[in-house]
Image: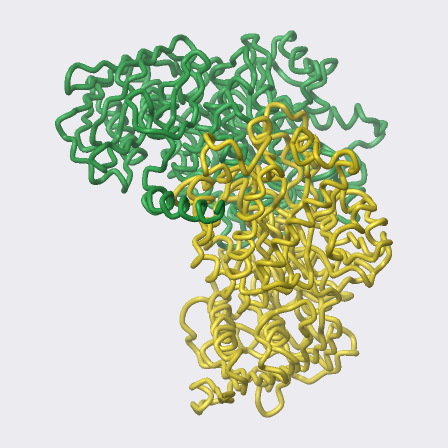
Chain colours: A yellow, B green
């Protein structure tokens, strides 16, 4: 039975004196000279100057909007904060940039973080998620301005309307579009209209970015008279984290999810196992983690994964779990002991970093089926499935009986394809007799060859290396993760003595992440589902996970959300640095983009 | 059938291993001839160590010590189990200051080793006594300080004794650091976590270089005091002894000066991004306790802009020129621009006040770094006041170098009059003034120490040594920790850092790794510096003939040690390679 619930925040019923800054403003038209913005801001601040005392140990800075740029000035009385200037002077500091922003005339109001009222009606399917999201919205305001709200300020009424509130799973075709209007007529009101919960969530994220901390008055402000229509250019916008080379605790991964939600990224792809470790505890094959995890405290339990899946979904993100095979296996796999003459994994002794499933032992495929079963259950999602399939070393398989038997008629690549078909068959069985709609494999010599046509399924390719033209010509869907452009791990040099340099040096700065448009380079725009940035973690552990990811993944996020044709340096740098500050306000660590002087002097570096 | 068997196996195994894997199925075995700890799964056996960490303590000639001791190291492969509560200190010194210092480092030692997981250790019969003898009362840490020490560990029955002797408190501190690296946590058969110490050892140790430094830049981006303290901790654990604090630059001036409040007023990024004199004092004593001295650099005449704007309002004229001038490419090599005005005589009065304030914050006799890098002639050459001052002189490079050296001479005079002597060593970066052909004309070799920042292939360091200058080497293409994130620079990973060898002639005081701050702030500076600075630490302390490959196991261990002591050191390798020594 479906039941529609009404929800409104308790404080909406409380009467209080409206304290709306805009009543002190001289109304002006946005199209007029921007110096008006400064005049208006100055008028606002004279109201607060009495609250300041006359001690100025440090000369403060104030910012003036000149020719659409914020210019820093020394002053004994600060008038306009950098945040306020950035928000009011040119484009509002939103990241990623929405499709369409109409500001009828720029105006801002001081709001009260304790007086946020929500009003929505929804089906039960997304009710809990929406409640969580509104709580998060309030928590984020709290983080922006910690401490007590000493003076009552304006209430912000948020009205959310979701047309299809039964959609509680995020799929490739899920509508993420939203329409957000913030006005201050009789009331300060934000109206959100979205097709699905996921669009509404994005709208709340955008709304939270229309609110900023003004350090001159120690209050939160909101920009209003704003009308935003927004939707993503690509449906698959991901971050991949390798949790096998080094382990990362669940809470840290959740912080990455927080940052992804802020950036409107929507896929967390966990490359959860590899040859060196197997940290995920799978109910059907627990031995893999027992033997393959780095330590007892370095595992993900089934409860951890379910928790992460729900946590992410609330934030508009789905979790893709990849257990890479048939290569990149080793740790945990030979749990049956070496006395058995048939091992699950071979070549693991000679290359511990890349063992392979043993084609002479059919039971390896049965274990794989158990793994697939567990992964499908744990992620609660079967529209997409990632099989791995990268870097198969065919010489490893050469000596096996299976190859010898078939060799007369088959090339090694054909053998690889036929083994992949056996893996696909296991996936089909695990998925109740049908293939998932999108089966993803890393690009490889197999996917670049004509053998790709011999696979039983038209797979989606996660393209990282080489030329994708043959894949595209064959009409396969593509998720781009171009090495050298969208790899987060490159640039830290060799990590073992036998290497002479890093695998994919040099380091890729955020500007490259931002500018890369593989669908323009390669064509076939309609085959591009989107992209993922990848963090392989041979040289990353807990402390540097976040700083490797941010702000570069945010730069990428604007690429896959907005796909802008041009890059206006002033606009992009200024908005991104504001976004970095916002990430930090929510407790997410981001690398510095430049000396702080450059943030304080927009356009001068 | 096969599958059913497998599932059955799984149940048996998982109940045995997964759910009760507290001490895991892995044990480690030391292969002494290879110096490698090997991970094995198997039954408990007396020759096996319960953890990699305990195996590493004793495996190979230098066990898990970082940096490796220089004169001699003998470690037994036995471990002595004890509870931290039954560890005692004895100090044999008459001097109050020395004893106070020793007590404080003993407290630090206990703090470093204390672990919540080891609070249940009931083994209180075994005792460990650390006795320390310091032969002199010298409390100064400088280029002449003897940091060497001798260390002996003996076990007789239930008594373990650690005997340390050193000429100075700093040697004693290093010895305690070494002892802390001979101790690990240990899960015993009673299900308790205790500590173990190597039961017998003999170590004699002294550094190769007396100046073993890390440069931090707090002007491009501000670093909090707590972040700086973390670096000092990491330095202490790696026996680095100089924190070179590049405290100001053209972007900001975060150092509060009591007689020149305008410097921070105009130059700090914000009220909260200021170092107050009390912060500096606290940091200096914090560092001293960790065997680290702090050398302050106020870079000039270039790299000086924000903070210097107040001259005209104060009636002193332009103290610095080209400040924040645009387009910046015409006036400096990095925005924002700013270069002191050498022709304004008021500048030298201000510099004297500035130096006085800084000198007052430092221990008596401490050296000072005047910067002196990257003067950009087009700035001065486009400043009317300077052009007018030069009058008819041809505005050639040489004229400007002379002007620069005049500045340097007057700045030195200001410093000398502020400090009240004429023999405090001054450090300068290599620049056009330090080129072999001209340096003797511009800079006295008795007053200036030159910090070289040329690539490894450049002969300048050796040439300066040949001329009789003392140098500090900061090899740009191996020891610049900011490289790899801008321009065409490449990241120097720990192996490259480790393998960098600097001149050994006696004029080489030592070296520094440099963390320029354009692209780091509190969020990433720790992992950018650590553990790479520790790789340089072994080069500077031990200067081994071998390279990074031979140091790998100890270095991996040291990285873990830094992390467990609260320093967010970057990962070096998949954990598997740490757990399986030499297999990657």
Q: Compared to B204, does A174 lie above or below?
A: below
**Do we see residue B163 in this rendering?**
yes
Q: Residue A347 appears at what percent x and percent y?
A: 60, 30
Identify the image quadrant of the C terminus of chain B.
top right
Q: Nearer the viewer, residue A32 or A442?
A: A442
As drawn, is B322 to the left or to the right of B259?
right
Residue under the image location 45 percent in, 81 percent down = A152
* The image quarter in which residue A165 lies: bottom right
Residue under the image location 54 percent in, 10 percent down = B545
Q: Nearer the viewer, residue B115 or B432?
A: B115
Q: Compared to B294, does B141 lie above or below?
A: above
Residue under the image location 55 percent in, 67 percent down = A313
Q: Compared to B473, does A377 lie above or below?
A: below
Q: Residue A244 appears at what percent x and percent y?
A: 53, 43
* The image quarter in which residue B549 lies: top right
Q: Residue B580 appears at what percent x and percent y?
A: 47, 28
Q: Residue furthest left?
A: B125
**Do we see residue B384 in this rendering?**
no
Q: Residue B541 appears at what percent x and percent y?
A: 47, 17
As drawn, is A81 to the left or to the right of A443?
left
As drawn, is B49 to the left or to the right of A244?
left
* The image quarter in which residue A327 lies: top right
Q: Compared to A470, does A150 lie above or below?
A: below
Q: Nearer the viewer, residue B124 or A34?
A: B124
Number of numbered callouts drawn: 0
């Amino acid at each position: 039975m479906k039941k529609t619930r009404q929800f409104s925040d308790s404080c909406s019923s409380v009467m209080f004196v409206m304290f709306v800054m805009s009543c002190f403003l001289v109304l002006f038209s946005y199209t007029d000279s921007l110096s008006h913005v400064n005049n208006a801001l100055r008028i606002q601040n004279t109201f607060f100057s009495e609250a300041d005392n006359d001690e100025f140990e440090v000369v403060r800075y104030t910012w003036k909007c000149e020719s659409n740029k914020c210019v820093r000035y020394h002053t004994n009385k600060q008038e306009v904060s950098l945040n306020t200037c950035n928000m009011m002077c040119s484009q509002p500091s939103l990241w990623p940039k929405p499709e369409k922003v109409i500001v009828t005339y720029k105006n801002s109001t001081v709001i009260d973080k304790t007086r946020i009222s929500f009003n929505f009606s929804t089906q039960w399917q997304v009710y809990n998620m929406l409640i969580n999201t509104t709580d998060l919205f309030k928590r984020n305001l709290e983080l922006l301005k910690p401490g007590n709200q000493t003076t009552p300020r304006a209430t912000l009424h948020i009205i959310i309307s979701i047309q299809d509130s039964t959609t509680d799973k995020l799929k490739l075709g899920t509508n993420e579009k939203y329409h957000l209007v913030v006005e201050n007529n009789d009331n300060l009101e934000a109206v959100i209209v979205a097709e699905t919960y996921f669009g509404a969530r994005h709208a709340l994220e955008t709304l939270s970015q229309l609110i900023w901390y003004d350090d001159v008055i120690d209050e939160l402000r909101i920009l209003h008279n704003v009308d935003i229509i927004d939707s993503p250019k690509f449906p698959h916008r991901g971050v991949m984290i390798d949790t096998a080379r080094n382990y990362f605790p669940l809470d840290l991964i959740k912080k990455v999810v927080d940052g992804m939600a802020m950036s409107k990224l929507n896929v967390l792809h966990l490359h959860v196992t590899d040859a060196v470790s197997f940290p995920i505890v799978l109910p059907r094959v627990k031995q893999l983690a027992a033997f393959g995890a780095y330590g007892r405290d370095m595992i993900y339990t089934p409860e951890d994964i379910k928790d992460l899946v729900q946590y992410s979904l609330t934030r508009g993100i789905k979790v893709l779990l990849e257990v890479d095979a048939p290569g990149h296996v080793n740790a945990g796999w030979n749990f049956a002991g070496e006395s058995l003459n048939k091992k699950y994994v071979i070549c693991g002794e000679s290359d511990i970093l890349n063992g392979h499933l043993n084609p002479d032992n059919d039971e390896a495929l049965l274990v794989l089926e158990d793994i697939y079963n567990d992964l499908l259950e744990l992620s609660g999602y079967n529209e997409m499935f990632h099989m791995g399939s990268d870097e198969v070393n065919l010489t490893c398989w050469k000596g096996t009986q299976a190859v010898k038997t078939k060799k007369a008629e088959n090339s090694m690549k054909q053998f690889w394809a036929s083994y992949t078909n056996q893996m696909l068959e296991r996936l089909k069985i695990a998925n109740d007799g049908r293939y998932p709609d999108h089966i993803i494999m890393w690009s490889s010599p197999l996917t670049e060859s004509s053998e790709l046509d011999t696979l039983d399924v038209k797979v989606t390719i996660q393209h990282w290396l080489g030329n994708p033209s043959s894949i595209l010509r064959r009409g396969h869907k593509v998720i781009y993760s171009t090495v050298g452009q969208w790899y987060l791990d490159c640039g830290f040099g060799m990590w073992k003595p036998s290497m002479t340099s890093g695998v994919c040096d040099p380091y890729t700065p955020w500007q490259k992440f931002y500018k890369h448009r593989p669908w323009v380079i390669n064509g076939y725009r309609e085959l591009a589902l989107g992209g993922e940035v990848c963090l392989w973690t041979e040289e990353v552990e807990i402390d540097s996970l976040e700083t490797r990811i941010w702000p570069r993944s945010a730069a990428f996020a604007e690429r896959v959300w907005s796909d802008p044709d041009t890059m206006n340096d002033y606009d992009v740098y200024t908005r991104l640095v504001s976004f970095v500050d916002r990430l930090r306000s929510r407790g997410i660590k981001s690398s510095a983009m430049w000396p702080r002087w450059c943030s304080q002097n927009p356009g001068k570096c | 059938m096969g599958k059913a068997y497998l599932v059955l196996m799984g149940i048996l195994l998982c109940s045995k291993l997964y759910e009760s894997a507290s001490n895991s199925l892995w044990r480690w075995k030391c292969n002494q001839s290879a110096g490698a700890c090997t991970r094995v799964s198997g039954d408990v056996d007396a020759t096996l160590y319960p953890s990699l960490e305990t195996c590493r303590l004793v495996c190979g000639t230098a066990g898990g010590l970082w940096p490796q001791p220089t004169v001699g190291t003998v470690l037994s492969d036995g471990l002595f189990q004890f509870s931290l509560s039954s560890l005692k200190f004895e100090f044999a010194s008459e001097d109050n200051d020395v004893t106070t210092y020793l007590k404080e480092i003993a407290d630090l030692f206990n703090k470093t080793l204390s672990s919540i997981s080891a609070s249940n250790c009931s083994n209180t019969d075994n005792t460990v006594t650390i006795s320390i003898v310091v032969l002199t009362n010298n409390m100064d840490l400088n280029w002449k300080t003897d940091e060497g020490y001798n260390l002996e560990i003996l076990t007789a029955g239930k008594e373990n004794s650690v005997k340390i002797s050193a000429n100075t408190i700093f040697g004693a501190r290093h010895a305690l650091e070494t002892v802390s690296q001979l101790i690990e946590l240990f899960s015993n058969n009673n299900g308790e976590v205790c500590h173990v110490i190597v039961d017998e050892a003999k170590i004699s140790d002294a550094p190769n270089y007396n100046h073993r430094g890390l440069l931090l830049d707090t002007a491009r981006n501000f670093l909090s005091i707590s972040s700086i303290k973390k670096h000092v901790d990491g330095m202490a654990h790696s026996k680095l002894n100089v924190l070179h604090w590049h405290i100001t630059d053209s972007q900001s001036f975060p150092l509060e000066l009591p007689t020149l409040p305008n410097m921070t007023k105009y130059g700090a990024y914000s009220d909260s991004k200021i170092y107050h004199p009390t912060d500096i004092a606290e940091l200096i004593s914090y560092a001293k306790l960790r065997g680290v001295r702090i050398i302050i650099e106020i870079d000039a005449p270039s790299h000086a802009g924000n903070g210097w704007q107040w001259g005209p309002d104060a009636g002193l004229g332009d103290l610095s020129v080209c400040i924040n001038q645009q387009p910046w490419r015409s006036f400096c090599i990095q925005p924002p621009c700013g270069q002191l005005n050498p022709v304004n005589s008021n500048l030298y009065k201000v510099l004297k006040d500035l130096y006085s304030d800084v000198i007052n914050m430092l221990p008596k006799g401490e050296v000072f770094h005047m910067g002196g890098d990257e003067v950009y002639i087009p700035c001065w050459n486009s400043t009317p006041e300077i052009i007018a001052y030069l009058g008819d002189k041809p505005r050639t490079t040489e004229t400007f170098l002379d002007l620069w050296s005049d500045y340097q001479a007057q700045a030195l005079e200001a410093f000398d009059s502020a400090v009240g002597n004429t023999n405090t060593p001054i450090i300068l970066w290599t620049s056009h003034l330090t080129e072999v052909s001209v340096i003797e004309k511009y800079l006295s070799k008795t007053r200036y120490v030159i910090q070289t920042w040329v690539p490894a292939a450049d002969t300048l360091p050796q040439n300066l040594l040949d001329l009789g200058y003392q140098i500090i080497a900061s090899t740009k293409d191996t020891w610049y920790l900011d490289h790899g994130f801008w321009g065409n620079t490449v990241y120097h990973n720990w192996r490259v850092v480790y393998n960098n060898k600097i001149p050994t002639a006696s004029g080489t005081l030592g070296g520094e790794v440099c963390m320029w701050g354009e692209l780091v702030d509190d969020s990433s500076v720790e992992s950018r510096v650590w553990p790479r600075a520790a790789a340089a630490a072994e080069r500077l302390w031990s200067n081994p003939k071998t390279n990074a490959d031979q140091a790998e196991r100890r270095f991996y261990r040291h990285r873990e040690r830094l992390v467990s002591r609260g320093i967010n050191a970057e990962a070096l390798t998949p954990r598997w390679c740490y757990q399986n020594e030499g297999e990657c």
